[in-house]
Amino acid sequence: MLAIRKVSLALALLTGATAAHADVSSLPDTLSYQDTFNLEYPASPFFLSDGSTVVYERRSMDVMQDRTHSSLWQVDLKSQSHRPLLANNANVRQAVLSDDGSKLAYISDQGGSAQLYVRYMDSGQSARLTNLSHSPGSLTWSHDGRHIAFTLFTPASQPPLFKDMPKKPSGANWAEPATFIEKTRYRSDGAGYLPDGYQQIYILPVSGGTPRQLTTGNFPNGGSLSFSKDDQWIYFAADRAEDYALRPLGGDIFRVNTQSAAIEQITDIAGPEYAPSLSPDGKWLAFVQLNDRKLSYQTGDIMIMHTESGKTRRLTSSLDRNIGGFVWADDSDSLVFSYLDEGNNRLARVDLDGDIDKLDIAIGGQSMGRPYTSGEFALSKKGDIAFTTATMTTPADLALYTRRGKTTTLTDLNSDALGHLKLAQVEAIKVTSSVDERNIDAWVALPPDFDSSKRYPMILEIHGGPHAAYGPHFSMEVQLMAAKGYVVVWSNPRGSSSYGEDFGNLIHHNYPSEDYNDLMDVVDAVIAKGYVDTKNLFITGGSGGGVLTAWSVGKTDRFAAAVVAKPVINWVSFALTADAYPYFSQYWMEAMPWEVADKLWDRSPLSLVGNVKTPTMLLTGESDYRTPISESEQFYQALRLQGVDAAMVRIPGAPHGIASRPSRLIQKVGNILAWFERYKTTAEK
């Protein structure tokens, strides 16, 4: 990875300056927008069979293709040597090792489309196994290493309603034919309008051949897969009811026979079950189960089922935290899992009796844009854990936690890009809510060369969700804001995840509400430190943070300017235009939107637009189907009608996740800062 400052020095040498006379002091020493393309982070780690080597996806930014590039690298744990395994111009992902360690299955686009490959670890030879029109997913080895199961989108033709269209004359230039839609889930953020068809499960011999379809039906059969001990069955989760699309949290565990394709239902518990995983000895089936009470924020539990008796046991009900990924220990007597806790993603071990041992590990570092919780881990047969690290000033590296409790960092992916730069230092603060004296976690990023005797402009950055969590994690967006001289504060107001169901549901059918008060308390707490210019307070947030930003400027004039990113402005219109409308109408609303329109209006930022005097910019992707751009347009037009300074930034082709491409992250932050700079006054002396 060649950092931009290395390029600048090389240019100085080429234009006549010698190494002795090159003016290195003229090179920038703080973060710039171009540095976005220099970042890297690890993902999807796994151990080779003997536990002596960790393999991971090394994800970097491709400046020419404006995307994330993924290759496979490996670290020898004894020698600490770090070298490529599969690293070329192709993207490699979903790498999965066979049980005996002899073969590696993975997805690569080296032939132009995403196909399934297998690599023989002894010889290094690779073979392409598929020629599919859609990308396979959920790669899973049979225990004997002879087959790979995977999920695949399988088209299902939808006949047109109107069949008597005249035949177009040869050479005629007619309009495109109409699209006939007759399904509940017809578009999805990031995917656009969905083709007709469903995810189905397939199995393929590694020796070559044709993938064989095992599941059918007009419902998706996907998610993680798990082979039975004898390889005769594949366990999976699905909602196989005809009205599945109207049951956003439906689902049970099934299994399909690998020979006959017969399907059997395994669980029938109220609420969804998902992520099935059989223990190495085949005696226990683990899965996550959610006791669905139609609350907007609910935490699931890891459950186990004895495969012979069918008896179940709930293992993590005492935790009251979001459960993430989990993996069986090799001796089948415990599981290691991740869970969200107070803005961090942590690891714990639970035995089959439900006794939980919290490990001293926080994972993260993979949310490059904003400081969200994230992270992945892997467990070796010996009990060692490889994980992505969570730090406040750098993206993730790969680290090792041994069964003896020792932690070692294995990689150093970003010191070349960031090590010579002055980054914002991050401090944690505790805020007491003025509503009910609850503790609110918050973090403050201080600009490089911070001087507490000076006064700085401040940005309040609000997370989305609203049931999500920020934490003490690296954020390129925050760092770029701080590099421009801003103090940046972010927090977890009521409703945030990682603090339990009671805290999350303080905004159930009541959003936004006192979460606004929590945010203003955070602003006041930072101002009280004495280094903030109160004439230059700014506010921004995306998605749920956009809701709260728009709500805040309707409640107060204390901010000099605001940027409302991808918001909900009118809950009634949102409920009937968002892609996940069956979920929002059932879990975020007391009844159908037309039945509770008055209550939804009372919680809509648009209801307060008559109060707004703050210069406000709207920023949304034009292909956002989660919070459609029509929401932003409503607020923009209302602001313009009453003469408030307002602007709208539309990101072409961008879905809800605007920062999914590096250049879009730059556009997002750059426009936010440019808007704030327009309204920033001379700082207090």
Image (spheres, helix red, strand yellow):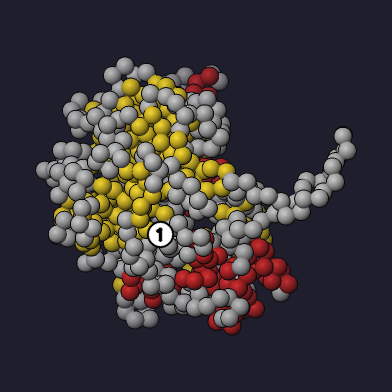
Going 37% across and 66% down the picture, which residue do you hit? 271
Q: Secondary structure at mark 1?
A: loop
Is residue 120 placed above or below 342 in the rendered structure? above
Please, which residue is most extreme toward the left here? 404
Q: Quadrant of residue 249?
A: bottom left
Q: Is residue 489 left or right of residue 283?
A: right
Going 33% across and 65% down the picture, which residue do you hit? 269
Is residue 496 placed above or below 105 in the rendered structure? below
Where residue 606 sits: x, y (%)? 62, 74
**Crowd class of label 1 (few under 14; some 14 to 19; many from 20; radius 10 Å):** many
Report the number of discs: 1
Q: Between residues 246 and 558, which one lies in front from this camera angle?
A: 246
Quarter occupied by the N terminus: top left
Q: Amino acid at mark 1?
A: Gly
Q: Between residues 462 and 198, which one lies in front from this camera angle?
A: 198
Going 55% across and 65% down the picture, which residue do you hit? 581
Q: Is residue 523 left or right of residue 438?
A: right
